[in-house]
Amino acid sequence: MPFVRLTVGKLDTNCYFVFDNQNKGVIIDPGGDAQQILDAVDERQLEIEYVMLTHAHFDHMLAVDKIQSSIKADLLVPRGDVDALTDGSKSLMFMAGGARVSLKADRLLDDGDTVTVGKLSFHVINTPGHTPGSSCYLCGDLLLTGDTLFAGGFGRTDFAGGDNHAMRRSLIRLSKLKGDYTVLPGHGETTTLENERHNNPYMRLI
Ligand SMILES: [Zn+2]
């Protein structure tokens, strides 16, 4: 499955493009550097249908406004994080260095939903813990994990709406997915689910 990773914003968030062989696809977590993202879309001649968030923290959504003013793409957000689109205390806007954002979702995503774009299907797995709405997206051999699962770690649970027990359940759920996937996390390096099952101390103990 073709994908592109751009590292954006001051927290080095991974923004991904996932697209089919006709270049129809989505942008996931445009957390900053809108112009860099738009240039990359142009350069690859991608036809972006949706902007999807894995969760609504500022560093995953700061560029949404600017992208939507250049590209006609609906914003898809996990239902459990809808309040954070307009509530800066929930999106950690105080860490955003004066930037502000207030967004409106075009579609709210629930566990088990499927998002179809061109030849791609994204299966929504709600994995609360980092935030209530945090969700992973399964698409072909890709598993986009946001700030739930990182290479060798997992997302913080000490922010507003974080829940350590929920995170543990979410990691167990991911570890029990059948087969292997390329894991594309919200920060840091690409990994695989099988590698994390064996080497991630927080998954290995499960
Ligand atoms: Zn986050």
Image: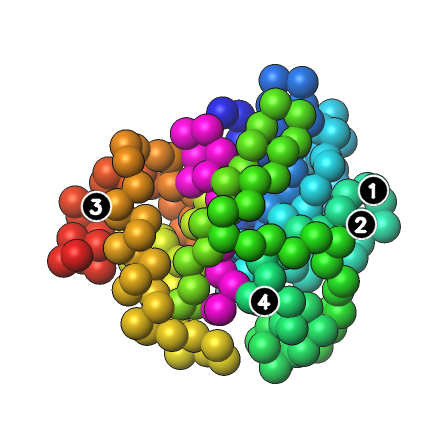
Q: CA distance from mark 4 to mark 3?
A: 27 Å
Q: Is residue 132 magenta?
A: yes
- Image x and y of residue 101, in percent: 74, 69
How many other residues sit within 10 Å of disc 2, few (<14), some (14-19) or many (≥20)? some
Above or below, 165 against 34 in this view is below
Q: Which residue is mark 4?
A: 81
Q: Which residue is mark 1?
A: 72
| Secondary element type, mark 2 | helix
- Image x and y of residue 50, in percent: 70, 42
Q: Amino acid at mark 3?
A: Arg
Above or below, 99 against 44 in this view is below
Q: Is residue 134 magenta?
A: yes
Circle nearer the N terminus (4, 3): 4
Q: Amino acid at mark 1?
A: Lys
| Secondary element type, mark 4 | helix
| Secondary element type, mark 3 | helix
Q: CA distance from mark 4 to mark 1?
A: 22 Å
Q: Amino acid at mark 2?
A: Gln
Tell me if label 4 and label 2 are in contact, CB under 8 Å: no
Q: Residue at x 16, y 45 (%)?
A: 198
Q: CA distance from mark 3 to mark 1?
A: 39 Å
Q: Which residue is mark 2?
A: 68
Say left or right for 17 vs 86.
left
Tell me if label 1 and label 2 are in contact, CB under 8 Å: yes
